[in-house]
């Protein structure tokens, strides 16, 4: 039995997306061409834009299609920063949470290193939710210096949900961007109701194809482009439309929304059952974060290393993810777990199991059955190494 418990990394494509993708791939035409073939493809793109806008609660004109969620995050972070500095050179501070995805953290660090930006990280509580009092106090004391705020809607490692609406209310006229790639199709997400200035969503997180995403940007608001060319998307993002993937993205998002409530309840029940049974079987294991996203379960197993755990699980046909990031082949503790107050050893002994619509009770039963022996073998290896 092959068991896939890494839905937070990417979700299997749903039938609706596969059908939409393959059908559109057979249609020739560049959406920017003026002939009838091009206009037909452009209509398909705009129909998909309208459908996606209906799903996420925004105006169609507010959707800017990009190649990836990382591109959309970079576009938002750099675009807002450059625009703010151009208007007022003293507005150089970027406020973000300590648990942002690297798609947000790294562009901020680049702006610090190359553009003179100042990065201020909002601390998080041990449950993985930001300290909203810090946000309120910092903005009250430094509002004129802040170029933008970027706080993720939900965290990819521990699943915690963030109070974006409250941040928006405190921020006033400061632009607020939220990385919502993990939220769409899993929890309630409505751009208009949220009040954010911009949000990032991604196709492959909702059962659509890889290689297409979107930045939702408030109507009438322009930001400085990162790439230049044909100006296809409001002169904010240039590049030929990936029509097949855009159409499939919209189909996947609509399917995810239609099944969201029933699937979220079922997946959350599986997660809670798995957590309780794992803690019963391995009493010294600890849960990281609190229940937020329905499918995220992050657990630390003392006296182990996540790499060993992953390899042992993989040998049993179970795909999961580490609670630590890996850069250039060098394992390092997760900045998310460190921000929660976990030690480096705790962070390096953590696993993330992320469940999705294809996850079954039988797969959870198999995980709970095999995990104690996997942890035991990992501990034996750890004791030898230590």
Image: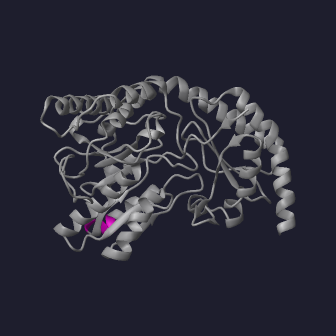
Tell me: 314 left or right of 234.
Answer: right
Q: Position of residue 319 (x, y in %)?
A: 67, 43
Which quadrant of the view contains residue 304? bottom right
Q: How many marks?
A: 0
Residue closer to the observer: 166 or 92: 92
Main secondary structure along the magenta-highlighted residues: helix
Q: Tell me, yes or no, if residue 117 can be seen here.
A: yes
Residue closer to the observer: 292 or 329: 329
Residue depicted at 33% across the width and 29% down the height: 24
* On screen, residue 269 above or below 333: above
Tell me: 84 left or right of 191.
Answer: left
Residue depicted at 55% across the width and 53% down the height: 128
- In reply to whether residue 187 is colored magenta, the answer given is no
Q: Position of residue 284 (x, y in %)?
A: 80, 51
The quadrant of the picture occupied by the C terminus is bottom right
Q: Position of residue 156 (x, y in %)?
A: 53, 48
Q: Position of residue 353 (x, y in %)?
A: 65, 43
Q: Which residues are magenta?
A: 140-144
């Amino acid at each position: 039995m092959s068991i896939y418990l890494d839905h937070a990394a990417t979700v299997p494509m749903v039938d609706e997306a596969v059908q939409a993708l393959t059908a559109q791939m057979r249609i020739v035409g560049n959406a920017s061409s003026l002939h009838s073939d091009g206009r037909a493809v452009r209509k398909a793109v705009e129909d998909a834009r309208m459908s996606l806008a209906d799903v996420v609660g925004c105006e169609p004109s507010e959707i800017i299609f990009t190649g990836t969620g990382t591109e959309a995050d970079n576009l938002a972070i750099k675009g807002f920063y450059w625009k703010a500095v151009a208007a007022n050179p003293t507005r150089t501070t970027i406020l973000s949470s300590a648990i942002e995805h690297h798609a947000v953290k790294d562009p901020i660090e680049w702006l610090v290193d190359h553009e003179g930006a100042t990065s201020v990280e909002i601390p998080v509580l041990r449950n993985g939710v930001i300290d909203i009092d810090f946000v309120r106090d910092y903005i009250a004391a430094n509002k004129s210096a802040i170029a933008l705020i970027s706080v993720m809607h939900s965290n990819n490692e521990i699943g915690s949900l963030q109070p974006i609406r409250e941040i928006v209310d405190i921020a006033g006229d400061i632009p607020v961007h939220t990385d919502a790639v993990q939220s769409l199709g899993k929890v309630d997400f409505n751009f208009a109701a949220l009040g954010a200035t911009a949000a990032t969503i991604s196709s492959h997180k909702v059962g659509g194809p890889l290689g297409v995403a979107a930045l939702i940007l408030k109507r009438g608001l322009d930001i400085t482009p990162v790439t230049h060319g044909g100006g296809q998307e409001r002169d904010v993002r240039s590049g030929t439309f990936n029509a097949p993937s855009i159409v499939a993205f919209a189909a996947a998002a609509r399917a995810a929304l239609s099944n969201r409530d029933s699937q979220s309840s079922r997946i959350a029940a599986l997660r809670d059952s798995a957590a309780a049974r794992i803690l019963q079987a391995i009493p010294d294991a600890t849960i990281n974060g609190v229940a937020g996203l329905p499918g995220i379960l992050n657990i630390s197993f003392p006296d182990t290393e996540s790499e060993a755990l992953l390899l042992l699980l993989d040998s049993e046909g179970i795909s999961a993810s580490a609670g630590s990031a890996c850069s250039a082949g060098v394992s390092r503790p997760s900045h998310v777990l460190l921000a929660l107050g976990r030690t480096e050893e705790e962070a390096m002994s953590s696993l993330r199991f992320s469940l999705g619509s294809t996850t079954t009770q039988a797969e959870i039963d198999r995980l709970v059955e095999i995990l104690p022996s996997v942890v035991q073998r990992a501990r034996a290896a750890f004791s030898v190494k230590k």
